[in-house]
Amino acid sequence: MAPTPGEIAAVLAEGRAEMANLFTDSGRITKPGTGARVRDEATGQYTDPARVVVYEGPCRIQVKADINSNVVESTAGEREWTYLTAQLQLPVTTPAGATGSVDDVDVDYVLEVLTAPYSPTLVGTLFNIQGTYHKSQAVYGRYRVREVVQ
């Protein structure tokens, strides 16, 4: 017998509450600012507009054991880059106390890890959001991210 919509909702709510306990890290997700680049007359250098915070709050970084988790090396010109892929996990709905909204997170935005009590070396790490995993009955939001290591 198939579960009722109410039973499905109850199971999802329970899973989301349990998942909230695993969001021990916190991060800030930003997107490029709007407006024109500004030229510094003294140096002649241009600066981009300030980045805009889209979401700041609980998150979790996980490396998944699949083909996309391997270290990949690519050579561009004379420079070699190595990058690692991982998964950013966010609450399905924006939790109380968070800034912005998880609904506004999108591809090509940047995550900065602010706190990571169980992996302090992650603090300050930047990840580029590469893609979204869609799921109809999600317990947490999933995003493919890439850390660039030079």
Image (tube, helix red, strand yellow):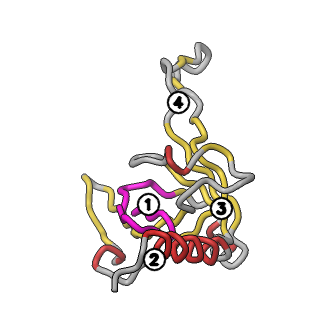
Q: Amino acid at mark 4?
A: Gly
Sequence-wise, the earlier of marks 1 and 4 is 4
Q: Which residue is mark 1?
A: 148
Mark 3 and 1 residues: CB-CB less than 8 Å, in contact?
A: no
Residue at (72, 54) in percent of width and height = 96
Sequence-wise, the earlier of marks 2 and 3 is 3
Q: Which residue is mark 2?
A: 63
Q: Quadrant of residue 128?
A: bottom left
In the figure, is residue 115 to the left or right of 87?
right
Residue at (54, 54) in percent of width and height = 111
Q: Which residue is mark 3?
A: 58
**Residue 11 image offset from top left, x and y in percent:** 52, 77
**Residue 52 image offset from top left, x and y in percent:** 58, 35
- Tell us which disc is closer to us: 1 or 2: 2
What secondary structure predominates along the stretch shown in magenta? strand
Label 4 residue SS: loop
Q: How many marks?
A: 4
Sequence-wise, the earlier of marks 1 and 2 is 2
Q: Amino acid at mark 2?
A: Val
Q: Amino acid at mark 1?
A: Val
Q: Which residue is mark 4?
A: 33
Q: Quadrant of the N terminus?
A: bottom left
Give the distance between the C-alpha atoms of the residues marked 3 and 1, in whole angstroms: 22 Å
Q: Which residues are magenta?
A: 127-150
Sequence-wise, the earlier of marks 3 and 1 is 3
